Image (cartoon, helix red, strand yellow):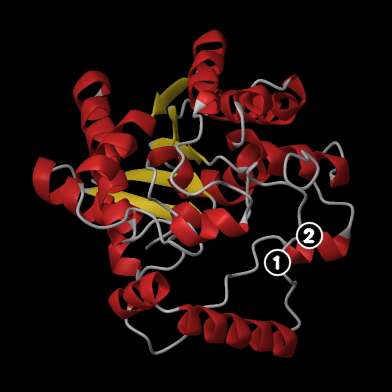
């Protein structure tokens, strides 16, 4: 991709965390890749989708990334994919940031965005089958990842306490009470408004989307991982935060699109999982669903605003 945007190209920035980045699937199957290729083929609009997803990023960091890295790319549209962990992430990150959005703890800043450790030379489809059916594979994979982390001096996964806003990345999904906690909304609300104002000043449209985690989309999704993270098997957890996010957008002039109903429908219809049973990220099928939804949003935008 050229930094200088060709005159005939419509450039879209997709901003998000590891779900947007495409953790656990090959690049060709990420929803950002699928969306860009297929929009161009299906609509005739020469569209370039830039994947700006990074593991563990959240709106507090999205703002700086858009400002420092995104705006120089001269985008025509920015889509921010709000993840269910973003609420807790922003709450935690705020304690370590100065007024300019810089992390004061240098070690913590270095750990931000560290790539997930991938097991090389294993086809993504084979990985999916192994994750779903082999406890041995999961244990061996974890041991290899721990060894790689030790060799490369990468941080260990964060330990958290369930229902603790300071540490639990799934806090907002555990109960309706958690989802309605004003403390969980203070930072993310302010950061989304900052992103709105930044892009408005540059006359760049903003769309915010949100999607559920596996335990919110289907009773059988994220089967093994949910147990390890303190959720019950076979239970569908509330998606209150997504509805409240739409309300926040309506009150603040931010176009928020809720993909929760679409993922619930797909989880009931699709043969196979949308989320990996162990780590909970989108499978290729999950990326396919997200790409189709994003294409619909972008096509609607082309129709209404171009």
**In the shown orientation, is residue 171 left or right of residue 17?**
right
Q: Residue at horizontal 47%, vertical 25%?
A: 203
Q: Residue at horizontal 22%, vertical 34%?
A: 296
Name the residue carrying label 1.
157
Q: Can residue 171 be seen? A: yes
Frontmost residue, 48 versus 252: 252
Q: Quadrant of the N terminus?
A: bottom left
**In the shown orientation, is residue 285 left or right of residue 215?**
left
283 w.r.t. 207: above or below: below
Packing grade of label 1 (10 A; few <14, some 14-19, many >=20) is: few
The x, y position of residue 178, in whole percent, is 68, 28
The x, y position of residue 146, in whole percent, is 67, 83
Name the residue carrying label 2.
109
232 w.r.t. 1: above or below: above
Q: Quadrant of the C terminus?
A: top left
User: Judging from the image, what secondary structure is the residue with disc 2 in?
Assistant: helix
Query: Closer to the camera: disc 2 or disc 1?
Result: 1
Q: Residue at horizontal 30%, vertical 39%?
A: 294
């Amino acid at each position: 991709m050229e930094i200088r945007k060709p005159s005939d190209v419509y450039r879209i920035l997709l901003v998000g965390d590891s779900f947007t980045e495409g953790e656990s699937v090959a690049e060709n199957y990420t929803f950002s890749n699928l969306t860009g290729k297929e929009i161009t083929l299906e609509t005739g609009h020469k569209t370039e989708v830039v994947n700006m997803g990074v593991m563990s990023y959240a709106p507090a960091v999205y703002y700086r990334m858009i400002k420092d890295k995104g705006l120089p790319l001269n985008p025509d549209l920015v889509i921010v994919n709000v993840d269910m962990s973003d609420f807790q992430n922003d709450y935690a990150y705020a304690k370590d940031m100065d007024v300019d959005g810089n992390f004061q703890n240098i070690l913590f800043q270095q750990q931000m965005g560290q790539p997930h450790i991938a097991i090389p030379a294993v086809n993504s489809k084979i990985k999916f089958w192994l994750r779903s059916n082999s406890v041995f594979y999961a244990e061996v994979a974890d041991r290899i990842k721990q060894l790689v982390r030790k060799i490369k001096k990468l941080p260990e996964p964060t330990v958290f306490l369930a229902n603790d806003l300071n540490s639990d990345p799934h806090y907002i999904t555990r109960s309706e009470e958690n989802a309605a906690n004003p403390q969980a909304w203070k930072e993310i609300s302010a950061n989304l408004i900052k992103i709105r104002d930044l892009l408005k000043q540059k006359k760049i449209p903003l769309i915010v989307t949100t999607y559920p985690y596996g335990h919110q989309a289907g009773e059988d999704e994220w089967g093994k991982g949910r147990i390890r993270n303190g959720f019950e098997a076979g239970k569908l957890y509330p998606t209150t935060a997504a509805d409240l996010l739409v309300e926040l957008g309506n009150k603040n002039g931010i176009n928020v699109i809720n993909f929760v109903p679409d993922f619930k429908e797909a989880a009931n219809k699709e043969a196979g999982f949308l989320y990996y049973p162990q780590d909970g990220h989108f499978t290729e099928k999950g990326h396919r669903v997200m790409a189709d939804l994003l294409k619909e949003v972008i096509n609607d935008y082309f129709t209404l605003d171009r």
